[in-house]
Amino acid sequence: MIMVLTSEKTVYSAFGMRLTSEIALPELTRSVELTEEIDVEVAIGDLSRVWNEERTIYHSFYAVLDDQVLFYIPDTAIFSIQDGRKVIVSPIAGADEKKIRLYLLGTCMGVLLFQRKTFPLHGSAVVIEGKAYAFIGDSGAGKSTLAAAFLSKGYSLLSDDVIAVTLSDEGVPSVVPAYPQQKLWQESIDQLGMESSGYVPLYERDSKKYAIPVVAKFYTEPVPLGGVFELVKTEDDHWEIEPVEKLKRFPMLLYHTYRNHFISLLHLEQWHFATSASIARHVDMFQLRRPTVGFTAHYLASQILQLVSHKEECTNER
Amino acid sequence: MKDELITTGHIIGQTEDTLVSNMDQDKVMMSIQTGKYYNLGAIGGRIWDIIETPTTVGRLVEVLTLEFDVNQTVCEEQVIIFLNKLLKEQLIVVKEEASVNL
């Protein structure tokens, strides 16, 4: 396979980390400062031996060593994520480079964030009036489409897959920007009145989902987390929105933690629980149930805007 | 041991398979065994902290009456009700006083 090697190491920024990579990662923002310290190094290497040694002891597709997570994607690559500082990619001959990048930007970033004690939520986040709002939910719940509706109204994107939440010393949660790309299904592109011909399919077997670069609509600074909305599809014919009571916030945050099976594999249960408590304590959380049919993202976006701006007013009046 | 049998002489300790965190004034908890979530409240949270080192119910009540404005009889009654609830949820371990070497 032909892997695009960068002539000198390009420095990228994503999820508050500065990365260098031997594999070109065009989805990420290039960092302009070249002198600063590097947080994470992405390199190409041969992991076949260590993988063959470790795989039998553990599960068939991933292994957790002391400070290292190894995982294997058939026909694609073996990945190793070490100590929150280094990712090694060992490509399988004939692998689709786009698919390798999908795992680099997905699972590898998720594991890096766990190792660096940054809380990863699965979903999309946008900036409304200086606060970050996270949309979490199952695949197909409408997270990305809702985020796209906000972007079309002129709001900025923080993430469209992995929402990286950090805590201040006082335990106040903020969202760190991911990278300027949206992932949208063909039907969402149609619903939002966009045109898919200009966009790149995410990878060959998944041609109905497109990568949409949104550099101009991307927010590049960390933003305090203002609220979390869980999107749930219902068979009802109407939508409704309900605050989530405190104790129910914990299982919700656990369920929507990105690649949550790594929590116990990395022995991060107590950290995850304590961080969930900080998020649950500081942030408003809602469940937004919407009908399977007749869902318009623009309508839900306007309802969320009303709720958010109403809350702002209430806070200001106090 | 059977339910509702905790008396002042018993020694109470935490089970290890819980995740615990403070949330505002309350103490919240998850049982790793059952996946259930609990809010122990502020006083319940204080009790949880005290029994980090296994403690007799009598000693526990003594500490609480010093810290909170409550008379001993009422405190003991309430604490035993609370501890029995925790026991039922398998959040604490209870030992007879004599069986523990201090």
Image (spheres, coloured by chain):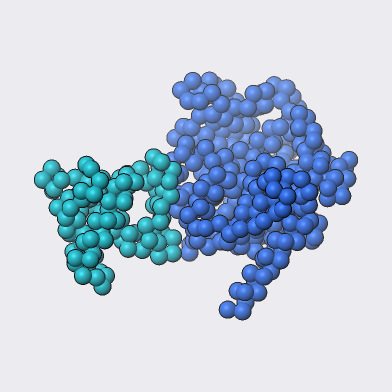
Residue at the farthest bottom position = A317
Colour displayed for chain B in the image of the structure: cyan
Residue at the farthest front position = A237
Between A244 and A130, the one nearer to me in the picture? A244
Q: Is residue B14 above or below residue A56?
A: below
Q: How many marks?
A: 0
Residue shown at 75% from the left, 61% from the top: A302
Colour displayed for chain A in the image of the structure: blue
Q: Quadrant of residue A7?
A: top right
Q: Is residue B54 above or below residue B45?
A: above
Residue shown at 46% from the left, 50% from the top: A273
Residue shown at 54% from the left, 41% from the top: A260
Q: Is residue A167 left or right of residue A42?
A: left
Residue shown at 80% from the left, 45% from the top: A188
Q: Quadrant of residue A1?
A: top right
Q: Is residue A62 above or below residue A198?
A: above
User: Residue A92: x percent and y percent?
Assistant: 66, 23
